[in-house]
């Protein structure tokens, strides 16, 4: 499977004692890098640590909580999300897609079909450019190191960025001094229609400002342009 020389990584969120290790074994047999998280509450933390190429949910929790978990993950990343469920409720299945799930696999499901689905979505997910294939970028006193997914501030401090934070900051810095509309940023960062809006974008901008601005309440690096969008300043002084 082509992945620019990298081994695709799959994060499996599964609180079934036997099923999780079973899926892990099958995927590792396919030469994939697999991370198992048995506590659903830790899924977002594990995602931010591992940056997987695919997330698989196979969790035994109330449907409402499952939907909430999916929504939280989808706000952080655009990687494909697969959901395994024994539910055949059309309302619930429709809600999962609205929450951000890319594919629902109805259980029971054979290992062969599960592996086939994983491979398909890993191939489909390669349209996103891995951060470590990008060149380092510098604007003013701020540097971006794609291989570390980090920003180096003017005082030499390294700041770790999430996947979405990095994608947004890299895009703004790559066109420093030029405005980008909210619609353009959503398309570039999330990479799909309908899964993000201006409120989610503002929250992401806010989080980045807290990490790189001296005074996040009065930002000089990422500037808001009323009626236009945002831009990264080439001369913050």
Image: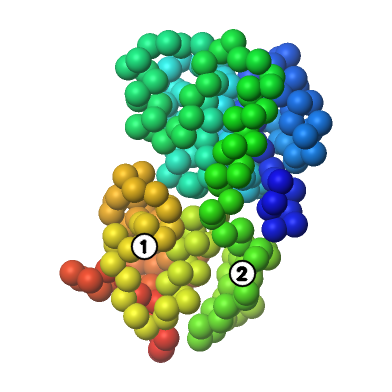
**Residue at left offset 29%, top offset 62%:** 182
Q: Nearer the viewer, residue 36 or 101?
A: 101
Q: Is residue 125 above or below residue 5?
A: above
For the residue labelled by badge 1, is the local secondary structure a helix, a strand or a loop?
helix
Q: Is residue 211 above or below residue 107?
A: below
Q: Is residue 15 above or below residue 197?
A: above
- 2 or 1: tag closer to the N-terminus: 2
**Residue at left offset 47%, top offset 76%:** 174
Within-10-Å neighbours for mark 1: few <14, some 14–19, many 20+:
some
Residue position for label 2: 134
Residue 189 figure quarter: bottom left
Q: Is residue 146 visible?
A: yes
x%, y% of residue 105? 53, 21
Q: Tell me: 23 left or right of 164.
A: right
x%, y% of residue 140? 51, 86
* Label at residue 93: none
Q: Tell me: 197 left or right of 5.
A: left
Most extreme residue toward the left is 227
For the residue labelled by badge 2, is the local secondary structure a helix, a strand or a loop?
loop
Residue position for label 1: 185
Quadrant location of the C terminus?
bottom left
Residue 133 figure quarter: bottom right
**Residue at left offset 45%, top offset 32%:** 101
Colouring method of the image: rainbow
x%, y% of residue 127? 54, 54
Whole-angstrom CA distance, mark 2 to mark 1, is 18 Å
**Residue at left offset 60%, top offset 30%:** 117
Residue 68 figure quarter: top left
Q: Nearer the viewer, residue 132 or 165?
A: 132
Q: Tell me: 212 left or right of 31.
A: left
């Amino acid at each position: 499977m082509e992945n620019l020389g990298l081994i695709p990584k799959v994060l499996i969120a599964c609180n079934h004692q036997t099923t999780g290790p079973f899926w892990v074994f099958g995927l590792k047999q396919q030469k994939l890098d697999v991370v198992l998280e048995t506590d659903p509450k830790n899924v977002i933390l594990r995602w931010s640590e591992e940056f997987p190429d695919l997330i698989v949910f196979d969790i035994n929790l109330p449907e409402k909580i499952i939907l909430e978990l999916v929504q939280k993950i989808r706000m952080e990343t655009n990687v494909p999300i697969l959901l395994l469920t024994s539910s055949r409720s059309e309302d619930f299945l429709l809600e999962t897609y609205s929450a951000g799930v890319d594919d629902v696999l109805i259980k029971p499901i054979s290992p062969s079909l599960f592996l086939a689905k994983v491979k398909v979505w890993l191939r489909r997910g390669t349209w996103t450019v891995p951060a470590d294939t990008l060149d380092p970028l510098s604007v003013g006193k701020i540097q971006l190191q794609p291989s570390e997914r980090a920003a180096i501030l003017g005082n030499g401090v390294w700041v770790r960025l999430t996947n979405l934070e990095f994608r947004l900051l890299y895009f703004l810095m790559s066109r420093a001094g030029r405005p980008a509309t909210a619609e353009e940023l959503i398309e570039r960062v999330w990479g799909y229609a309908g899964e993000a809006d201006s409120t989610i974008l503002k929250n992401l901008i806010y989080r980045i400002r807290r990490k790189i601005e001296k005074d996040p309440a009065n930002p000089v690096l990422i500037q808001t342009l009323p009626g236009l969008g945002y831009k990264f300043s080439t001369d913050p002084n």
